[in-house]
Image (cartoon, helix red, strand yellow):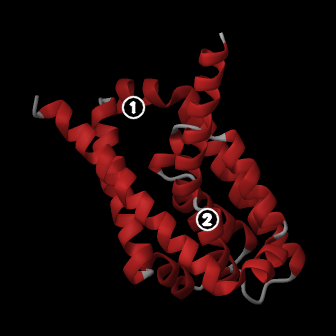
Amino acid sequence: MYEINHMDWNTLFQSMLILFAIVNPIGSIPIFLELAGGMAPEARKKAFNMAVFTSAAILFFFLAAGKWILASFFRISLPDLMAAGGLLLLIIAIDHLIFGALVRGVRSAGQRTAHHIGAVPMACPILAGPGAMISIIGVLGITWVIFRFIDVVYRLLGEAVCLVLSKILCLFLAAIGIRLLMQGLTYYFR
């Protein structure tokens, strides 16, 4: 009995660590602060609440109905989604590691309302990307706390630590993306 419960907690903890790397709330701090630069504190609070709650809604929706929607309407199987999600995670990780084009694209678009930044790109695809559709509650709770106290966390960690942690988590994200891509492709090449 102890071994089963211990294994379940271990699996849950591993899943949360993987999801934490995928959601990357620490790495999102500089992105959020840059996107929300010049906003009043109340507007920033609206933006991070919008980001976390919208990503939670997206993830819970796809957790509940995603398999049915994908199979019934789009004729997409789990291996298809794994391959596409893995490729997308790899692209996002490479973008964050090297280019940062996603943030520059949003910044140059000129739309900086709290609802816009909170929904796109923070909620989707940054927080609720394809890899985050596996485990949810714990990591989104941690993400909400980090965003709620973003100024304190940023002051404690500093820009350099946030950027380094972001790059490390992006490396993990790239590895997870490759694993998902390979698992999806393996299905077709058996």
Question: Which residue sits at x=54%, y=71%?
Answer: 166
Determine the residue positioned at 31% across, 46% down: 179
Secondary element type, mark 2: helix
* Residue reaching furthest to the left: 189
Which of 100 and 7 lies nearest the eye of the viewer? 7
Work out which residue is located at the far top of the displayed protein and give it.
Answer: 1
Q: Amino acid at mark 2?
A: Met
Q: Residue at 52%, 87% (x, y): give it.
A: 108
CA–CA distance between discs 1 and 2? 24 Å
Whether residue 169 is situated above or below residue 19 in the rendered picture: below
**SS category of the residue bearing label 1:** helix
Q: Residue at x 89, y 74 (%)?
A: 42
Q: Quadrant of the C terminus?
A: top left
- Please name the amino acid that badge 1 sits on: Leu
- The residue where tag 1 is placed is 70
In the drawing, does residue 8 fall left or right of residue 94? right
x, y percent for residue 13: 62, 39
Q: Which mark is residue 50?
A: none
What residue is shown with label 2? 122
